[in-house]
Image (cartoon, rainbow, N blue to C red):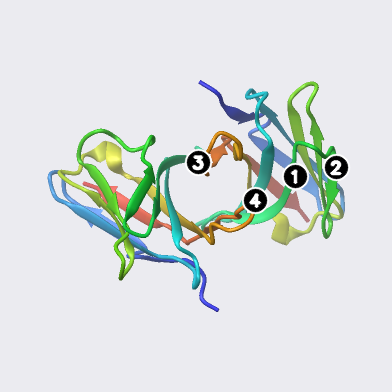
Amino acid sequence: NAGVMQNPRHLVRRRGQEARLRCSPMKGHSHVYWYRQLPEEGLKFMVYLQKENIIDESGMPKERFSAEFPKEGPSILRIQQVVRGDSAAYFCASSSGQGALNEQYFGPGTRLTVT
Amino acid sequence: GESVGLHLPTLSVQEGDNSIINCAYSNSASDYFIWYKQESGKGPQFIIDIRSNMDKRQGQRVTVLLNKTVKHLSLQIAATQPGDSAVYFCAENPLTGGGNKLTFGTGTQLKVEL
């Protein structure tokens, strides 16, 4: 039973390029969350999506960042015109959306380096 | 804004000793808390959780204590092993009020010495 999968695991981009991070949730999960982690810090919530819907994007920067979770395929976190400050580890989590506690399971993360 | 934070950035313990990792939270309306373990290069791994209507919950070698009066959370690890070396985060999930986003603390690095 595969867990949450993220790819690529490492991504290097030059300033101004675009970064696309992919997340495949656990089988049976329809809720996806993206978090960002800077070195020596905790994870910061970015966005919460269900299939074809953005539920909460209160943690997303207003510009250059977007996320989607299409009906088919993985969730995509897209960063346009990357800057050095975007360098971080980006984690995806998924949940079933059922039950009061709705535990989130995390993927291994994508480490983005902007040069 | 509301935040969840940890008291100690690094904790060193001898193998076999018990470890206690502390966490303070500021949102008095928080009703669900989770402890995660993060090993180097990996994503957070769920350890144990507790709801605000409880003050203690035990798992395998781990115990979480919640003191709502002082808004304090702790994780106790019994008979600490080298495999326990990692960064530990407490996180808050406001179940009420909608949404399902986790608010993480800064993290405590646990180092187990042989």
Q: Amino acid at mark 1?
A: Ile
Q: Amino acid at mark 4?
A: Leu
Asked if marks 1 and 4 touch (Cβ < 8 Å), the reply is no
Asked if marks 1 and 3 touch (Cβ < 8 Å), the reply is no
Does label 2 lie on the same chain as label 4?
A: no
**Residue indicated by mark 1:** B50
Q: N-terminal of the two: label 1 or label 2?
A: 1
Asked if marks 1 and 2 touch (Cβ < 8 Å), the reply is yes
On the image, the x and y values in percent for residue A84 come to 24, 39
On the image, the x and y values in percent for residue B84 come to 71, 56
Quarter of the image with the N terminus of chain A in it = bottom right
Disc 1, SS: strand
**Residue indicated by mark 4:** A101
Does label 4 lie on the same chain as label 1?
A: no
Q: Would residue B5 appear left or right of A17 to someone viewing this image?
A: right
Does label 3 lie on the same chain as label 1?
A: yes
**Residue indicated by mark 3:** B99
Q: Would residue A109 appear left or right of A66 to someone viewing this image?
A: right
Q: Residue at x 17, y 46 (%)?
A: A80
* Separation of marks 1 and 2 at Cα, in angstroms: 7 Å
* Separation of marks 1 and 4 at Cα, in angstroms: 10 Å
The answer for which chain carries disc 2 is B
**Residue indicated by mark 2:** B56
Q: Nearer the viewer, residue B90 or A25?
A: A25
The answer for which chain carries disc 3 is B
Disc 2, SS: strand
Q: Amino acid at mark 3?
A: Gly
Count neighbours of disc 2 (C-alpha within 10 A) and say few if under 14, some if 14 to 19, many if 20 or more: some
Disc 3, SS: loop
Q: Residue at x 53, y 38 (%)?
A: B98
Q: Residue at x 33, y 38 (%)?
A: A60
